[in-house]
Amino acid sequence: MIVGLSTLMALVYAEDDPFCEDCNAWTEKEATVATLWPAEDDEKSLPSLLEGDLTALTTLGRVQGCKYPRLELDLSTCPKCDASNYLSVKLCDKTVDKDGDISTNEEALLSNMVVAQEHLELIRNAGRDIPVDVPERKSSAEQHLAQLEQQARVEEGDADA
């Protein structure tokens, strides 16, 4: 029974947090070390990143504030050594349901990819500043709300006529 319970606990922890075999310790997660903007016109950076090319992190735009859709980068590192480092990437977006309720959806794109110690600063400082003249993509929630506002304006115009 004790063996079964300890195995179950290990599986629960292993789902999210990698284990450092060298130190016999669980890694510590640094949530959202970088937030990036998946530009619609950039069809190469995200697939390259998901294939393990960390140089793609320099081409994605850095998100300032609370904008959606966006990529969030999480790091998990061993607290005792420099040998166990892992990168996870998730796509976050806001959606609106049929009742008009807004929710945030997260999709794991990359989970616990092994990265070298020398790449940690690149990950923490990922992205480039987005030029002011680049239009922002609206999240699906923002698009839906804009459609509802437009529909309300049209209906108000019909009621006034």
Image: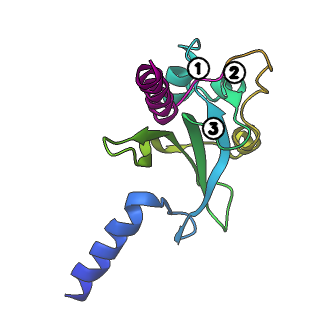
The image shows residue 126 at horizontal and vertical percentages of 72, 35
| Residue span colored magenta | 136-161
Image-based side of 40 in relation to 133, left or right: left
Number of labels in the image equals: 3
Going from N to C along the chain, the mark reached first, 1 or 3, is 1
Residue at which label 1 appears: 45
Among all residues in the image, which is located at the extreme left?
1
Going from N to C along the chain, the mark reached first, 1 or 2, is 1
Residue 60 falls in image quadrant: top right
The image shows residue 83 at horizontal and vertical percentages of 63, 54
Residue 136 appears in the rendering:
yes
Image-based side of 93 in relation to 10, left or right: right
Residue depicted at 44% across the width and 17% down the height? 161
Residue at which label 3 appears: 67
Going from N to C along the chain, the mark reached first, 3 or 2, is 2
Q: Quadrant of the N terminus?
A: bottom left
Position above or below: 45 against 14:
above
The amino acid type, in three-letter code, at marker 1 is: Ser
Residue at which label 2 appears: 59
3D distance between C-alphas at marks 1 and 2: 7 Å
Residue 55 falls in image quadrant: top right
Of helix, strand and loop, which one carries label 1?
helix
146 or 139: nearer the viewer: 146
Position above or below: 93 against 112:
above
